[in-house]
Amino acid sequence: MLRRFISYYRPHVKLFALDMFASFLISALGMMYPIITNRMLNDLIPNREYKSIIFAGVLVLGLYIVRFFLRYFVQYFGHVVGVRMQAQMRNELFSHLQKLPYSYYDTNETGKIMSRLTNDLFEVSELAHHGPENLLISGIMVVWSFLYLMTIDVYLTLIVFAAVPFLVVVTLLSRKKMRAAFSERRAATAEINAATESSISGIRVTKAFVAREEEKRKFSKGNDHFVASSHAAYRAMAMFFSSTSFITDVFNVVLLIAGGIFLYNGSINFGEYSTFIVSVNLFISPVMTLVNFSEQFQNGATGFRRFLEVMDTPPEEDAPDAVPLTNVRGEIVFSHVDFSYEESNEVLRDLSFTVGVGEKLALVGPSGGGKTTVCHLIPRFYRPTGGEILIDGTPISRLTTDSLRRSIGIVQQDVFLFSGSFRDNIRYGRPDATEEEIVAAAKAANIHDYILSLEGGYDTEIGERGVKLSGGQKQRLSIARVFLKNPPILILDEATSALDNTTEMLIQRALDRLCEGRTTIVVAHRLSTVKNADRIAVVQKGGISEIGTHEELMKRDGGVYRSLYAAQFTDGTLPEFVETALS
């Protein structure tokens, strides 16, 4: 892990080297004060060298001014290095998130992912900046101050230094407990972020169901977890710092007693003893800095570890011999396909069917039968656990992911729109589209006139996830997006099921135009919308029980499709044998 962390310094090595050099000079200048103090106490003051005393004071002031600028440089450019590393990691993490499979997002909440992008990487940035500086400055100061104290009195220095091993032992004993406690607190913070993101995203549903107390309960659960984990973390930290502070207090007691005895015995004079008192802080302070640094190290290391957990999650990858999908005709073949989201929950079993070039196949049947799963498998959002899917005779496992998905357009019931303008959302899949192409797509989707009725036209902001639009407007905007993409294969997954009849008719006309000349798979519960499909397949229990045209399926006495269709236009009651077949 350390090697991977250090690798992020490479792009900023020049600025980092200057930062470290400035830190080195700060340490060197810090040693000048006790040296000059020793000279004044033992030479200049006893000999009443007035001018030299003034000169020494001015020299110290000048050194402090130089150190002021050096500290400014370290504080500013050191943080710049940390922020640039943070930005680099954030870019890599965001890019990696784009490559992760659907299954990753099935098990990881958005708020927790956001916590890794923000809170965790901030702690990593702080460690990247302060860590090397603290280690360098404090390390040099400990060594130099120790050597300098040895020149004053070897035995007194060794007595004081004897307390250091106790400090190291306490650090090692407390370190493991602190790491575990802060890791737990980090997880609790992510839980709060996830609850907040979920609650804010669903605020309209919360208000509609007057469920604010339930949301408060869920948030409080995460908040209580954070408080409890924080108590544990700070309890470990309190024990750590109180113990280490006690040992440093012992430093002073040892120095007071031993120094007094040495002074009494004449082993050192008063000037040397005074210098030692002043100088010993140059030894104790960096030791305490190194000790205190452990908290920041724990936070930063935990954040970097959580960053690596995501980065080490395997992304979607193309096969070594993958080829781009070109000159797409649009034939789709499912050959003995099996699929399960979990080993114990098989969704598709030995599913086989073919969709011809330019054909429109409708998938109908009960919820949970596998219709949407079929739609997810074609663009390889998930991979079959058995069998294979072919497009134009080539298994999709041997096609590059990008070329496959560029050839497929998807319109779903749950439309996702991005914050921005109408223009931004229409050209989302084709940023280089011309204005004429954007307008043509909007006209084909029956939303152009509505857009022009707005004051801002195509530059009008639609709000977060299109909150300013009705359901029909959102759907038409998503259809315009697909029109502009112009894919040879089209998937319509419950595209109109959430709309009223009037809006559905308007959008259905746009969808009919969209389907022209494309291989289309339609998933629908309203059977009236798919009766004109070239073929209709009844999907249930992970397989196809019936397939044919509307007329063919309606002629089957006791057929499932015929019973489903009749039920939608009568009282909604299904025959007993159909209920049994679907259950």
Image: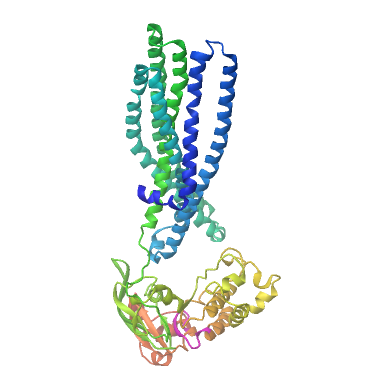
Whether residue 111 is visible, yes or no, is no
Q: How many numbered marks are there?
A: 0
Whether residue 254 is visible, yes or no, is yes
Q: From what the image shows, is residue 281 above or below residue 341? A: above
Q: From what the image shows, is residue 288 above or below residue 12? A: above
Q: On the picture, is 569 further left or further right than 308?
A: right
Q: Residue at x 42, y 87 (%)?
A: 329
Q: Residue at x 37, y 54 (%)?
A: 309
Residue 509: where, in percent of width, then height?
A: 56, 84
Instruction: Identify the image quadrant of residue 510.
Output: bottom right
Q: Residue at x 45, y 50 (%)?
A: 190
Residue 573: where, in percent of width, then height?
A: 43, 79
Q: Residue furthest right?
A: 455
Residue 524 falls within the magenta-colored stretch: yes
Residue 59: where, in percent of width, then height?
A: 57, 25
Magenta residues (range) = 514-527
Q: From what the image shows, is residue 570 above or below residue 473? A: below
Residue 125: where, in percent of width, then height?
A: 47, 47
